[in-house]
Amino acid sequence: MSERNIELEVLRYDPEQDDAPHFQAYSVPYREDWVVLDAINYVKEELDRTLSYRWSCHMAVCGSCGVVVNGEPVLACHTFLRDYPQKIRIEPLQNFPVERDLVVVMDDFIDKLDSVKPYLVAKEEKDVDDGAYLQTPAELARFKQYTACINCLLCYSACPQYALTEAFAGPAALALAHRYNLDSRDAGRSVREDVVASNAGIWECSFVGACSEVCPKSVDPAAAIQQTKIASTGDYFVRFLMPWKRK
Amino acid sequence: MSRRPYIREPSRTGWWLEQPRYIRYMLREISALFIGIYALALIVGLFQLSKGQAAYEGFLAATAGPAGRTFAVLAMLFAIYHTYTWFQVTPKAMPLTLAGKRVPGAFIIAAHWFGFFLVSAALWLLAGS
């Protein structure tokens, strides 16, 4: 089999030696059915064992292998070599501190995700013996799209608002807050409002829409945020016109 | 092993030039400026109209030059772009469910354009009568 090679340029950063990141070039075999992650794995296994990066499932489910390829945030396992020109430039996700090579520090996201309580806040606690919290297919359909989020952080890498405003809760956290707010079994909306409806929440979003364009799971965080803005505006008018009606 | 994360600072002024989607976003945002100035000019025109024919003709003469016309064309192009982008995102902000089924986004967009032309036609008829 005749084999041609493709050039990878990978951002390298060793906190123990480097003052700043730099690109390093690797020549890897080009295979029609290879994704970028296969090429990175080839580098690790055959060329340079010092390269650090995250990955796990290789099937766009775990959300670990988010990187920036030729300027676009993508999942390395979901991006074919064949869709790119001769040179492929791989960087860690934008808008996060670089821990080492392609590994970023995601603490800020984890804290923000935690702050919106991305779990069911039950209306009333039930005993296990009383059975499950039931839901109709129609009730599930209202939010199912937003459950597909795999926390891969591509949306944070694409969002200029998150890049420029440190406090912004960001697309995935707000989309997940919306997902639980729409859930018929949930009663946590007013608790989430403290973060979601604050200046660091939905109102910091100016609807660039980049989050939804790069989302590999079609979650559409931009839509979730705009819908939350409408709901939150409704809340404001209800409170304004009927101050006694507090949730 | 020591931790020393490297922070890559974003460009505070040039970030929007980095990707076509950011440029499209900035064009959409800046359209408000042109539409705003046009609306102000329109209000000034109405004010002049209330002061009588001579004042209004003075306003027309002041805005009919090459600069005024160029601005009007620019403002119209931005208004069309703004309308287009606004209608394109309506299915995201206002998803509709009818009889348990999600209404297709294209239908919501088309309904907005239909409403837009309906209102425009009504205004056109009113202005003509």
Image (spheres, rainbow, N blue to C red):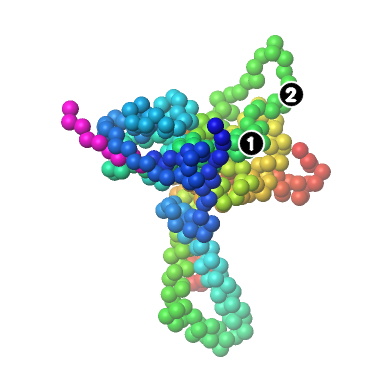
Q: Nearer the viewer, residue B62 or A68?
A: A68
Give the residue type that dot 1 points to.
Answer: Asp
- Percent across and percent down for residue A89 are 37, 43
Identified at 42% across, 33% down, the residue is A51
Give the residue type that dot 2 points to.
Answer: Glu
**Residue A76 vertical placement versus B106 (above, below):** above
Q: CA distance from mark 1 to mark 2?
A: 27 Å
Q: Nearer the viewer, residue A58 or A180?
A: A58
Residue span colored magenta? A1-9
Identified at 72% across, 36% down, the residue is A191
The answer to whether residue A217 shows anywhere in this view is yes
Disc 2 element = loop
In this figure, which residue is indicated by the disc labeled 2? A124
Q: Chain of mark 1?
A: A
In this figure, which residue is indicated by the disc labeled 1? A111
Identified at 47% across, 30% down, the residue is A54
Neighbour tally class for label 1: few under 14, some 14-19, many 20 plus, Cα within 10 Å: few
Give the farthest residue toward the left: A2
